[in-house]
Image: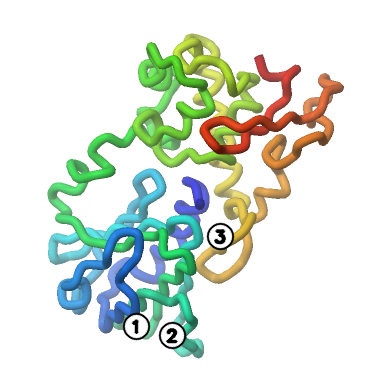
Amino acid sequence: MPELPEVEIVKRGLEPALSGKAFKHVEVRRSDLRVKVPDDFKSVIEGQSVRKLSRRGKYILIFLEGGQVVVLHLGMSGRIHIYKPGVPYEVQKHDHVILDTDDGSRIVFNDPRRFGMIYMTPANDWENQKPFSKMGPEPLGNKFSGPCLEEKLYGRKSNIKSALLDQKIVAGIGNIYACEALFESGIHPERAAGSVTGKEAEQLAAAIRSVLQKAIVAGGSSLKDYRQTDGSLGYFQHSFSVYDKESEKCPDCTCDDTVRRIVQAGRSTFFCPVKQR
């Protein structure tokens, strides 16, 4: 599933194509996604101008002048492809929602597994709606820090890796970047979440921010389905320190051990048993 960096890249790709533009034509070719596309989606969206775009966690928010927000989640295999004015387009099998703007651009939501979502919510109350009402802080935001993370982890007996995947603790982090941030901060993934305090919480918060920023610069991680809005791949997978590196030498020059793999809550965790304590 695309994580924060991939969703941020898609949002940035959509901004120049949608900001200030109006939806001239909307086609819902298939509505039975993870959450059903609303029956009135076409009638509400058509003719509306886009005021701004934002991201919250793994969700893209498209704010319309008429007071609605289009909420987009890519799910496991969802992609957004932008066709610029004049570029030929042929409908593909899994193109479920097609948005044409008044400048001739076409935005296509393609999702083979149909785990993605595209729906609407009122702009004046979106933060109080699920899942946003209980979502944790943005790891790239000004409010996210060591003390903030420590407060969220306080008293939690679950392992720190699983805690980082809990969107109520911090928004947008998934399996890849949790593994990478724990490695960078030197924290063992099986540690009790509540034991990460003080300096370690500061180090982990800094590592989370660092890993996410580096991934965004690299265009995200393309392992299976993820593509940028122009169809190109991300490149951060070539910079992984431990993720999917089982049995390879630890990249820390002071460590002579190899990367290990364990399973936590059904997800593979990659780490160095020497560097991470």
The residue carrying pointer 2 sits among few (fewer than 14), some (14 to 19) or many (20 or more) residues within 10 Å by Cα, namely few
Taking 138 as reference, is 223 above or below it? below
173 with respect to 234 (left or right): left
Q: Is residue 152 visible?
A: yes
Labelled disc at residue 103: 1
User: Percent position (x, y) of residue 15?
Assistant: 39, 63
In the rendered image, the residue lying farthest to the right is 256
3D distance between C-alphas at marks 3 and 2: 24 Å
| Marked residue nearer the N-terminal end (3 or 2) | 2
Q: Residue at x 78, y 26 (%)?
A: 252
Labelled disc at residue 231: none
| Marked residue nearer the N-terminal end (2 or 1) | 2
Q: Which quadrant would residue 48 be assigned to in this image?
A: bottom left
User: Percent position (x, y) of residue 69?
Assistant: 22, 59
187 and 166: which is toward the camera:
166
SS for dot 2: loop
Q: Is residue 52 visible?
A: no
Amino acid carrying label 1: it is Asp
SS for dot 1: loop
| Marked residue nearer the N-terminal end (3 or 1) | 1
Residue contact at pointers 2 and 1, CB within 8 angstroms: yes
Labelled disc at residue 85: 2
Q: How is the image coloured?
A: rainbow
3D distance between C-alphas at marks 3 and 1: 27 Å
Amino acid carrying label 3: it is Tyr
Q: How many marks?
A: 3
In this figure, which residue is indicated by the disc labeled 3?
226
User: Percent position (x, y) of residue 21?
Assistant: 29, 73
Amino acid carrying label 2: it is Pro
Q: Residue at x 36, y 16 (%)?
A: 151
33 and 186: which is toward the camera:
33
